[in-house]
Image (spheres, rainbow, N blue to C red):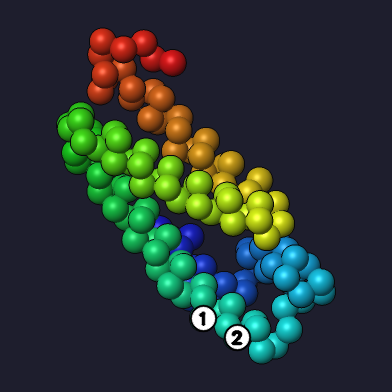
Amino acid sequence: ALFGVSFALWGDNPFFHWYNHALAQVFFHSENIPATPDRMRAFLFAPLGGTIAAAYILLAYIAAYPFKRKEKWTYPAIILAYGTWVLIDSACCLYYGMYIQLIGINIFSIIVKALPLIGARKAFFPGKPNS
């Protein structure tokens, strides 16, 4: 969630330099985003960062309460929500050539989300093998 807030409010900070540099190279064939589009980038990072923060706050709430109580709906809800994101985002990354996002963000996010789900699978589905 803090990542999303910092992305929304201060998307041109040094922590995001690699991402902004990749955007400049892919979309402007330049080392930096030109001034006019950079203003638009700053605006677009606001709702994107807010959405990231909201999604992780919701995930934390689900994980802390209903997921912890093994409520069956939470397992497929998390998979469906983040599966939808990863498919759409990864397809766009491939289409636009933003491979650094695909590798640096999406694959890392898949692993971080998949490990607890794999570990909890047996608790949610005790009759099925944990594969």
Q: Is residue 23 left or right of residue 8?
A: right
Q: Secondary structure at mark 1?
A: helix
Q: Which residue is mark 2?
A: 39
Q: Residue at x 42, y 47 (%)?
A: 84
Q: Is residue 19 left or right of residue 43?
A: right
Q: Mark 1: give few (<14), some (14-19) or many (20+) Cα within 10 Å.
A: some
The residue at which mark 1 appears reads as 43
User: What amino acid is at disc 1?
Assistant: Phe
Q: Closest to the observer: 96 or 54?
A: 96
Residue 30 lies, in percent from the top left, at 82, 74
**Mark 1 touches mark 2? (CB < 8 Å):** yes
x then y, percent, for residue 83: 43, 43
Looking at this view, is 70 or 5 the one in front? 70
Which residue does the image show at 33% across and 22% down from the upper left? 121
**Residue 48: x %, y % from top left:** 46, 68
Indicate the secondary structure of the residue bearing disc 2. helix
> Residue 34: x and y, percent?
73, 84
On-image quarter of the C terminus: top left
Q: What quarter of the picture does the N terminus occupy?
A: bottom left
For the point 33% across and 24% down, the residue is 120
Residue positioned 42% across, 60% down in the render: 52
Determine if residue 100 is in view.
Answer: no
Is residue 37 something one can see in this rendering? Answer: yes
- Badge 2 crowding class, 10 Å Cα cut-off, few under 14, some 14 to 19, many 20 or more, is few
Residue extending farthest bottom? 36
Q: Amino acid at mark 2?
A: Arg
- Give how far apart the Cα atoms at labels 1 and 2 are: 6 Å
Quarter assignment of residue 42:
bottom right
Picture layout, residue 118 above or below residue 77: above
Q: Quadrant of residue 50?
A: bottom left
